[in-house]
Amino acid sequence: MTATKRAAPPDRVARAAAGPDPGSFPADFVWGAATASYQIEGAVAEDGRTPSIWDAFAATPGRVRGGDTGAVACDHYHRYAEDVDLVAGLGLGAYRFSLAWPRICPDSDGRVNAAGLDFYDRLVDALLAQGVTPWATLYHWDLPQVLEERGGWPSRDTVDRFVELTAAAHDRLGDRVHHWITLNEPWCSAFLGYASGLHAPGRTDGDAAVAAAHHLLLAHGRAVEVLRADPQAQVGISVNLYPVVPLDDRPGNLDAARRIDGLQNRWFLDPLLLGSYPADVLEDLGLSASPAWLRDGDLAEISRPLDFLGINYYTRHTVRSGAYPGSAGVEFLDPRGPLAANGWGVEPDGLADILTRITRDYGDVPLVVTENGSAWDDAVDAAGAVEDAERTDYLASHLEACSRAIAAGVPLRGYFAWSLLDNFEWAEGYAVRFGLVHVDYATQKRTTKASGRWYARFVEDHRASILGP
Ligand code: FCB
């Protein structure tokens, strides 16, 4: 790490009484915030970048709320230095960002675009100059459109293209980036992208989605192999996990919970951590033990040891057996507790449940919460402040859940808030704000919210609990 230059400490703000004792987190616990390339960068046609599936999807009428696109987003491509200052100003030790594949391998023909990598070079240097450790995600959903046109994730060829991306990124950045996340939320890429069609590329083909999920996992395994050649690399993957709760213990409802837990959680955790697909889900999907997309040796590649498992947690699902078309006999029920502005239930106990469950069912792989956060209807008030008490409460209660899991013996090593900035929230466009920092999209002015100041204070108190004030 190069010289540490920290911005002025955040304003002193009272911490909500509900937050955990900062001293209950291990001394080397990693505190960070996360973003993703398409959600913040903009500059979609600069320095050789080609369109991604999200450019194409957002350009299709009716796909994204309000017709929003990532064409400008937070203009982070040009404002990254200011955004790195924000990370440092919050006192965070780590920043998770993703690499835009269409900047690095724009045509996916083996050619690496040096100008695209230059951007990440600058970003990484800016982070290190402020003492912030970069955590790079190789794929956060922005597949080059040219690859979708050649078959996308349902095609096994995409796995080889991902290996090329991994090697290109590591060749350029691996001397300074030591924390790598292969994929973000392969469930979303596969099932929202290819089955429900709610995300890019917007296909609705269940068989294609299951093949896509497998190829994503295989791409992960092959990327782990590439990165393992670097003894300094710490490698993980981020999966989105949800505890699935049956409405009650009637057999039909218990089975509904088993099915959804199987597809949402175990379909990814079992191959990654146990080297097998869950037999009950194979049966639910009507697949034989050896589906066409599964080749000898794949599961051994997928289950290569990880340095950490990244968990993205937002809420939990309550289900019962139902029968509406396309539901596979399962109905999702509205959350019973408080709701965030985007309708997601605020369920901090679910985070403690999922963390302890991983350790119980899959052993002591180190865990990192690589995303956690909530959306609220934030606005800048007359005094120029954003008073987002609900987000502070959400953060405090979820950190409390982390603290409880650690006390129960879970090897939790870090926490990344989603998100550093308000940004392009996929199919919801700019209507949904998750940031610790407010973005005025008309002026690109950034305003750190009260929750951001609270988090900064919490992190500072953690540091003080180790070093003394
Ligand atoms: C996760 C995504 C992230 C963001 C949050 C709210 O599923 O990984 O990009 O959209 O949800």
Image: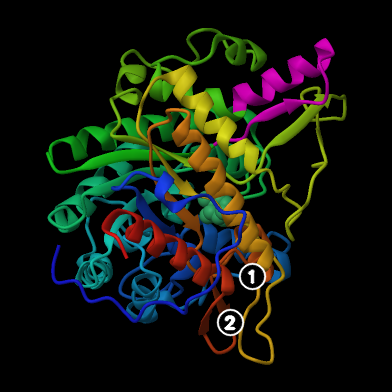
**The quadrant where residue 304 appears:** top left
Write down the residue under mark 2: 441
Q: Residue at x 14, y 72 (%)?
A: 3
Q: Secondary structure at mark 2?
A: loop
Q: Nearer the viewer, residue 71 or 170?
A: 170
Write down the residue under mark 1: 430
Is the residue indicated by label 2 positioned so its CB lies within 8 Å of ligand 1?
Answer: no
- Residue 174 within the magenta-colored segment of the rendering: no
Mark 1 and mark 2 lie on one chain; the one further toward the N terminus is 1
Tally the numbered discs.
2
Q: Are marks 1 and 2 in contact (CB under 8 Å)?
A: yes
Q: Is residue 395 left or right of 237 when viewed as pictured?
A: right
Magenta region, residue range = 241-263
The quadrant of the rendering that contains the N terminus is bottom left
Is the residue indicated by label 1 positioned so its CB lies within 8 Å of ligand 1?
Answer: no
Rendered location of residue 246, percent (x, y): 77, 24
- Residue 254 within the magenta-colored segment of the rendering: yes
- Dot 2, how many residues are within 10 Å of its Cα: few (below 14), some (14-19), or many (20+)? some
Residue 98 visible in the shown view: no
Q: Is residue 442 left or right of 359 when viewed as pictured?
A: right
Q: Residue at x 73, y 56 (%)?
A: 340
Residue farthest along the front direction in this orientation: 468
Q: Residue at x 13, y 37 (%)?
A: 229
Measured along the vertical axis of the image, is residue 66 above or below residue 289?
below
**The quadrant where residue 255 appears:** top right
Measured along the vertical axis of the image, is residue 174 above or below residue 61?
above
**The quadrant where residue 293 appears:** top left
- Three-letter code for the amino acid on which mark 1 is drawn: Tyr
- Three-letter code for the amino acid on which mark 2 is drawn: Tyr
